[in-house]
Amino acid sequence: MSGEKMVKFVVKRYDPEKGDFFTSTYDVPVRKGMTVLDALIYIKENLDGTLTFRYSCRMGICGSCALRVNGKATSICNLQVLELGTDTVVLEPLANLPPIRDLVVDVKPFFERFRSIRPYLIRPPGEPEEEFRQEPEVFKRYWPLSPCISCASCLSACPASIDDVFPGPSALMTNYRFLIDTRDAGREERLKMVGDTVWLCTACSSCSLVCPKEIDVASAITEEKSMLVEEGRIARRIADVLENAMTYHNPLGRLQAKRLEWAEGLEPPLPLARDVGKAERLFFTCCLTAFEPRHQEVARAVLQALRKAGLELATLGSEEWCCGDHILRMGEVGLFEELAEHNASLFERYGTSEVITISPHCYYVFKNEEPYRGLGLTVLHYTEVLAEALSSGRLRPSGSLKGLKVAYHDPCFLGKRSGLYEAPRAILASIPGIELVEFGRNRENSFCCGGGAGRVWTEEAEPEKRPSIHRLREALDLGVDVIATSCPFCICMLEDAAKVLDVEEEIAVRDVCELLAQVL
Ligand code: FES
């Protein structure tokens, strides 16, 4: 029939008799307007009657049809095949839920988590039934959180949900939806219910990215944390990090006077904005990078590469405070504002127009949060600057890392949150000799290292429940020598995972600039 296009469907199916997965491939003639669910129904009716999948309403309401399409969890009854823009579509069952048969998973664990937060209005006992009144302003706040169809896509994508003590993104978001509904009388109970587990959320934003109803689930969870912080209901391990940031202006609790130690001995010395009175192009170090010897190595490699590319930079040294991203994602809004206002005032004082960051967290917060955003700064991640210098020829690799097999891990705040996927890959691709391979879960479907929202300093889950361990196993399965990444927090989490699994001899974790530095 004219107007049809053949699309290959690769379906990962679960065989309950064998307890294992197998793959079936089907060629489907796809017409304009045909959804992924239509394609499955076509396969079932014309090609393979044994293929099992679940659906009901076919209107994007019941949530029963969700599965992973080319790695991304979503409902499929309103997802058009041609809009995917690929000739091959890979379908897999949702993750983080037990498979039953083919593409069907057991959703009971999802609904158990969801029910545990009492997803309905809690009213005082014995109160007579009467009409509820709601102010439009309150309604406007919780209405955007109400279209959840319980499809479990967010649970499938969520790194924290590999730990079954975590209620899951939709449950936490729905709990928050009732917390801000003035008709609900369950505030005390609701805050208690999520009190300790909500801190497992890494704020990676995977839940918001996959939600077929485009609910900003991640922000709702962060606001829920803020409610807990405001009431002082903070787990000890979280409170310690916040206290450090409050007292020392960095979450590690180190002395600010030592913030420039990483740059000692550099030739020429890195100018301090305070000494030269200006810093039009500012190198923002990040707390982890400034204080931890492992990450200080990265800072030196990045700075040397930027200098080789011809950039003149100044830095804030001991005047630099934490950018506040982790603090904000932990829900401490007031402390974030204090840190951010301090840094923003320095940017103004020193006439800064461009900031280059090492950490994707500094990068994200400078671009997206006030008061930073209002300064109109050009904010660049160092990978953008170096990728441009390589493509324009201002940097030319001269050596080779022959035979080194490398997989790039996308940091969530650089990738999923900021959409910056190609620059780090371009740097790696420019290094002669490297064999660059991709994780199965990459770019916007990448799997979080588990270190965001302060979890880098508070991890206490048993190893099997840590996202970093799962990610490291993926790299081991790929048989790579190196996981390259471009975030100090990812390096920290993945190196810890390598220690826990005792594979430090087998696999290394490196910043992309550390690899580049070897051939410059
Ligand atoms: Fe109901 Fe897709 S079948 S949401």
Image: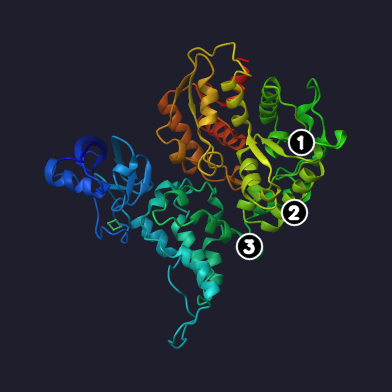
Tell me the residue at 30%/38% (across/down): 90
Front: mark 3 or 2: 2
Q: What's the distance in space between the residues labelled 3 and 2, CA to CA?
A: 21 Å
Label disc, if present, on residue 280 of the rendered structure = 1
Residue indicated by mark 3: 233
**Residue situated furthest front in the rendering:** 2
Dot 1 surroundings within 10 Å: few (below 14), some, or many (20 or more)? some
The kind of residue tagged 3 is: Arg
Quadrant of image for the C terminus:
top right
Give above or below for 416 relative to 474: below
Task: Indicate the position of residue 148 as horizontal and vertical percent values.
Answer: 40, 61
The kind of residue tagged 1 is: Glu
Task: Indicate the position of residue 12 as horizontal and vertical percent values.
Answer: 27, 38
Tell me the residue at 29%/35% (across/down): 88
User: Who is closer to the viewer here, 254 or 426?
Assistant: 426
Residue indicated by mark 2: 338
- Quadrant housing residue 509: top right
Quadrant of image for the N terminus:
top left
Q: Is residue 504 visible?
A: no
- In the image: residue 447, left or right of residue 269: left
Give above or below for 517 relative to 191: above
- In the image: residue 100, left or right of residue 447: left
Disc 3, SS:
loop
Q: Is residue 65 visible?
A: yes
Disc 1, SS:
loop
Tell me the residue at 55%/71% (across/down): 187
* Sequence-earlier tag: 3 or 2: 3
Front: mark 1 or 3: 1
Task: Indicate the position of residue 220 as horizontal and vertical percent values.
Answer: 53, 59
Dot 2 surroundings within 10 Å: few (below 14), some, or many (20 or more)? some
